Image (spheres, grey):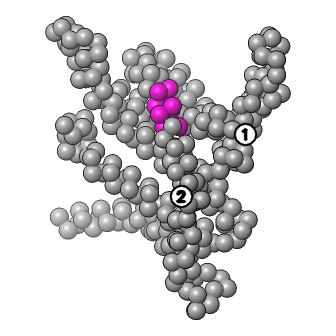
């Protein structure tokens, strides 16, 4: 028994070391910076201060946090509305069709993310493909404003997050026993009742995973707002990036980062509290 435990410890050592070195230690460094501890050039008289947290919780930054939350929430809803029908179709498709759709979903990852953002800018720009086609067909008289606004950001966010929502839902639905659907319909249940009682419970683990994979990265994203959002659609990720790279105010950037991590930890805690796959069938707590 002790030999087995030692073998498990040996197997866990490399990932734990990696996690400690590149995750735990950097987090503590960021938290220390947020209190002005360990920052180059800081004196002992102004060490360990809460001033940066007071600044981070001022009205303007609370507004940016709320705006980021709204963007992440709406993006998650839009992505879910597009991803679920696709995943549902994939789960009942033939093996060849599944592989083809899977290939098309993964294909964008073969291209650099910045190149994909520039492609969307070219597609949605005033002289881009969509506006040029609509102007040529006479549908519009002047180019539509589709970038440097909320619309462009949502297009970029949904495009970026769609694979992370489709794949977990498909993984859950693909394990569903199709005979249960047939039995439900044969016993007189409607399609809506069959969906609510059988399909949805099987899909919920993937739904929850997809929502987490979409909401949390979107909340702290700074690349898509920078390329597609314009100056009036700043998110908290852009503010943190500016504090680190432009203003060189690492303590304040660290304080904003710590607050963002705390918000994300709340959502993860709610996930662990209300959704525990180990306690119920198919990961659902009734």
Q: Which residue is mark 2?
A: 62
Secondary structure type for disc 1: loop
Residue 254 in sight in this render: no
| Coordinates of residue 58 in the picture (x, y in percent) | 55, 65
> In the rendered view, does 114 fall on the left or right side of 221?
right
Q: Which residues are magenta?
A: 75-83
Q: Main secondary structure of the magenta part?
A: helix
Secondary structure type for disc 2: helix
| Quarter occupied by residue 133 | top right
Residue ID at (60%, 74%)? 251
> In the rendered view, does 142 fall on the left or right side of 112?
right
| Coordinates of residue 23 in the picture (x, y in percent) | 49, 65
Q: CA distance from mark 2 to mark 1?
A: 22 Å
Q: Quadrant of the N terminus?
A: bottom left
State whether residue 111 is above or below residue 35: above
Q: Is residue 132 magenta?
A: no
| Coordinates of residue 92 in the picture (x, y in percent) | 39, 17
Q: Nearer the viewer, mark 2 or mark 1?
A: 2
State whether residue 6 is above or below residue 134: below
Figure disc tally: 2
Q: Which residue is mark 1?
A: 148
């Amino acid at each position: 028994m002790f030999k087995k435990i030692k073998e498990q410890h040996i197997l866990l050592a490399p990932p734990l070391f990696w996690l400690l070195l590149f995750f735990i230690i950097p987090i503590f460094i960021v938290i220390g910076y947020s209190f002005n501890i360990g920052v180059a050039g800081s004196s002992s008289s102004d060490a360990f201060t809460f001033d940066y947290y007071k600044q981070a919780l001022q009205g303007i930054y609370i507004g940016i946090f709320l705006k980021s939350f709204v963007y992440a929430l709406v993006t998650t809803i839009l992505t879910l509305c597009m991803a679920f029908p696709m995943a549902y179709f994939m789960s009942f498709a033939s093996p060849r069709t599944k592989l083809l759709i899977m290939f098309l979903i993964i294909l964008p990852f073969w291209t650099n993310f910045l190149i994909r953002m520039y492609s969307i800018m070219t597609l949605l720009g005033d002289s881009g493909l969509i506006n040029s086609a609509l102007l040529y067909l006479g549908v519009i008289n002047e180019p539509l404003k589709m970038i440097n606004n909320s619309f462009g950001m949502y297009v970029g966010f949904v495009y970026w997050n769609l694979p992370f929502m489709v794949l977990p839902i498909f993984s859950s639905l693909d394990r569903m026993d199709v005979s249960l659907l047939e039995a439900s319909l044969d016993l007189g249940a409607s399609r809506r009742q069959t969906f609510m009682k059988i399909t949805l419970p099987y899909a919920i683990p993937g739904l929850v995973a997809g929502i987490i994979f979409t909401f949390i990265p979107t909340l702290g994203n700074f690349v898509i707002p920078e390329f597609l959002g314009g100056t009036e659609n700043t998110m908290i990720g852009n503010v943190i990036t500016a504090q680190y790279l432009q203003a060189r105010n690492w303590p304040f950037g660290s304080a904003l980062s710590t607050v963002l991590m705390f918000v994300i930890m709340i959502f993860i805690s709610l996930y662990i509290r209300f959704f525990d796959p180990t306690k119920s069938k198919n990961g659902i707590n009734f």
